[in-house]
Image (spheres, rainbow, N blue to C red):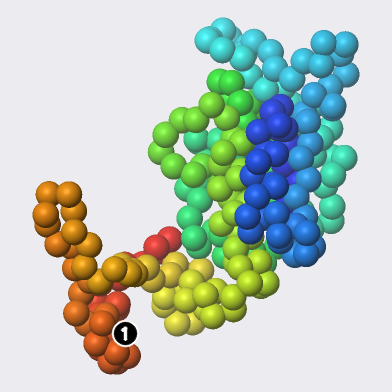
Amino acid sequence: MKFDIITIFPELFKGFLSESIIKRARKEKLIEINIHDLRDFTRDRHKSVDDKPFGGGRGMVLKVGPVYRAVSSIKEEKTKVVLLSPRGEKFNQKKAYQYSNLSHVILICGRYEGVDERIIEHVADETLSIGDYVLMGGELPAMVIVEAVSRLIPGVLGNSELLKERMPAVPGEKGRGFQEFPQYTRPEIFKSKEGKEWKVPKTLLSGNHRKIKKWRKNNSRIIGK
């Protein structure tokens, strides 16, 4: 799967791309991630990507021209073009499953006070938000989406059994979310500095897989439903 990310701050992605599972998945060519500097698609000597909004208002707005030219230069036949904005539909696990079946996604990182509305109307296929709050721009949301989708691509996690545990919690309904339950590891009893003992539930120490499975089911919740 290929991700193309359009941003005015390409340096922000260096650490994200060069560490951990994302780094390995790129090296093994399970995913491809390309970062594009929006300023490379401007046509004035100042490389302007934003301007004042018509009608007045505070802040600056990303211009439609550079974004349109950037998308046009990298868009393929089966590309999903996504604008990242607080105004967008909420991204969740269901959406991550849907995207994991695509071959190419372009992520446009919004900035400043927003983007020219013509980007939403004519350039992007979809507008997404990762939550009901406002960030400086779409770079962090882009990383969140890339990671959430990438981990669902076979081979990226390196453990097929782990991926099965994250499959839809409702049989036959792909993308309805997955079950998460409390997990513990050694020591069995942890003593805090106040002298309190924090214990692992006895069921998990029983060795009885049927009881453990039931305990996990009773203590789980569905993520991304």
Outermost residue on the left side: it is 195
Q: Describe residue 134's horizontal placement relative to residue 211 as left or right.
A: right
Query: Residue shown at 77%/15% (left/top)?
Result: 48
In front: 88, or 142?
142
Disc tally is 1
Residue 59, percent from left and from top: 56, 12
Residue 125 showing in the rendered view: no
In front: 97, or 56?
97
In front: 41, or 126?
41
Query: Residue shown at 12%/49% (left/top)?
Result: 194
Q: Residues within 10 Å of mark 1 (few under 14, many from 20)?
A: few
Q: Quadrant of the C terminus?
A: bottom left
Residue 221 showing in the rendered view: yes
Look at mark 1 in the image and give the residue it sits on.
213
Which amino acid type is shown beneath numbered disc 1? Answer: Lys
Query: Residue shown at 47%/48% (left/top)?
Result: 90
What kind of element bears circle 1? helix
In front: 140, or 190?
190
Looking at the image, is 102 positioned above or below residue 72?
below
Looking at the image, is 17 positioned above or below residue 47?
below
The picture quadrant where one finds residue 5 is top right
Residue 167, percent from left and from top: 50, 74
Query: Residue shown at 22%/82% (left/top)?
Result: 203
Looking at the image, is 125 positioned above or below residue 151?
above
Residue 221, percent from left and from top: 31, 67
Q: Quadrant of the N terminus?
A: bottom right
Looking at the image, is 97 positioned above or below residue 210?
above
Residue 85, percent from left and from top: 55, 35
The picture quadrant where one finds residue 123 is top right
